[in-house]
Amino acid sequence: MSSIETVSGSRGLLQAEGLIFEIGTPETTGVDLPAPKGTKNRLGGVARKQPTGLPGLSEPQAVRHYMRLSQKNYAIDLGLFPLGSCTMKHNPRLNEKIARLPGFGDIHPLQPQATVQGALELIDELATWLKTLTNMPAVAMSPKAGAHGEFCGMMTIRQALIARGEVETRKRVLVPESAHGTNPATAVQCGFIVDEIKANKRGRVDMEDLKAKLEKSDDIAGIMLTNPNTCGLFETDIKEIADLIHEAGGYFYCDGANFNAIVGRVRPGDLGIDAMHINLHKTFSTPHGGGGPGSGPTVLSEALAPYAPVPFVVKDADGMFRLVEDIEGVASESFGRMAAFHGQMGMFVRALTYILSHGADGLKQASEDAVLNANYVQARLKSVMTAPFDGYCMHEALFSDAFTAEGIETIDIAKALIDEGYHPMTMYFPLVVHGAMLIEPTESESKAELDRFCDALESIARRAAQGDEALKGAPYLAPMRRLDETKAARKPVLKWEEPVVAPPVAAE
């Protein structure tokens, strides 16, 4: 595949763009106002003593700069976003419209509660839906992301152990080796010791290893398990796992990142789960990425409900809604407050809009379609790529690099996908599969779009199996060629500095 270099650095209609420091100068500005007359300087001793050195741009320059940058981004609005374990689904515009209504968009968390009754009612209604869909009696709405929800669940478990007088003796949390990295990190942050559980040949929890660890001692605080798991498989022994954990005196925390695969089909409360966070920004279509905003409400079993964090919404006999925030009164067993205010209001509005738009039957169909799409991708590609586990998958299709010729790696396949116009799938995760490629199409995509994606990936996979060395240079058609990602991670350049220009060499 050839690469055509241009004088401008642009590639057709894809404009080249430098850093803002490279296209603007401190001497220029888009706005030129005369100095105000007849006013005194009120800055005192904090007035700036030297220029900021920030670049100035005209209005067209500023608009073009950010427009060109936006064209280099890949987004779900542009095409299929196949990141496995991330559920990058369509965000309906209706959700955005409702979230921007003045009654939701303009409220402030410090307003008197009597003036935000509609917002509190919305939080309460969303909480009711989450409890109904999971068959759990309580939910903490304040966690602001998936990892924050994990922290909430594990802190609730810790508080329950404190109430039992066992927090010092029950220190061990079991975590499957395919777990999200946040799981062991959260357990450690909450003061627990992590003990890894092996996976079996079916990609699920090795029950013999689990039983051996449970029999080894009586210090089990609980388990953190994702279901469906990160291999895209349903943990078929989950009810037995819950029973064994409870018999050992521990609690069952379920990572709900993959709840999108089972909404309307399976209720976690029926499986013996004690706590599970729900990513509103995955399951219920609220936007995510770029550091936020997320939202991770955490549903709790009857055993853990008394220890939930404040605040939570209650409806009084007179029909008024209010926040319970006093841990000295009704919430005296709570582990406390974990967020400054009440949660992510904008995400609550978007999630409830999505839920009400679909209804219970529509939510169930969305999950079924997500699983159907993933199995279609698996069926289309398993003849040319290696599926490490037999049978049907759930919401995501997992492949290993076993089909590739020597010298061709997963990253080469991912980079070649960029040339085909797609964001790469999740690579090298889960770690239990060598050279993993994890693809989650979600329910958003049509068969025609899945076929376009599979055609492209199938073509690349055949080249990889044949050892096509051209893959090592991909991408060829992207704004930037392949970067040294190891160096970028270890020695990132986080600050722009003006290039040092060497003085001209005097002629002899």
Image: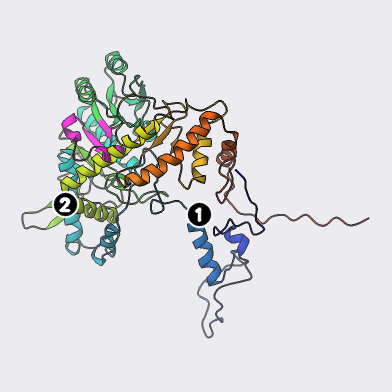
Residues at discs 2 and 1 in contact (Cβ within 8 Å)? no
Quadrant for the C terminus, please.
bottom right
- Discs 2/1, front: 1
Determine which residue is flagged by label 2: 125
Q: Residue at x 64, y 54 (%)?
A: 497
Q: Residue at x 59, y 65 (%)?
A: 55
Please identify the quarter of the rendering in which residue 245 is found.
top left
Where does the magenta region start and end? 253-276
**Name of the residue lying farthest toward the right:** 508
Q: Secondary structure at mark 1?
A: loop
Q: Residue at x 52, y 45 (%)?
A: 419
Q: Secondary structure at mark 2?
A: helix
Determine which residue is flagged by label 1: 72
Against 368, is 430 above or below?
above
For label 2, count other residues whose C-alpha is less than 10 Å away and answer few (under 14), some (14-19) or many (20+): some
Q: Nearer the viewer, residue 49 or 185?
A: 185
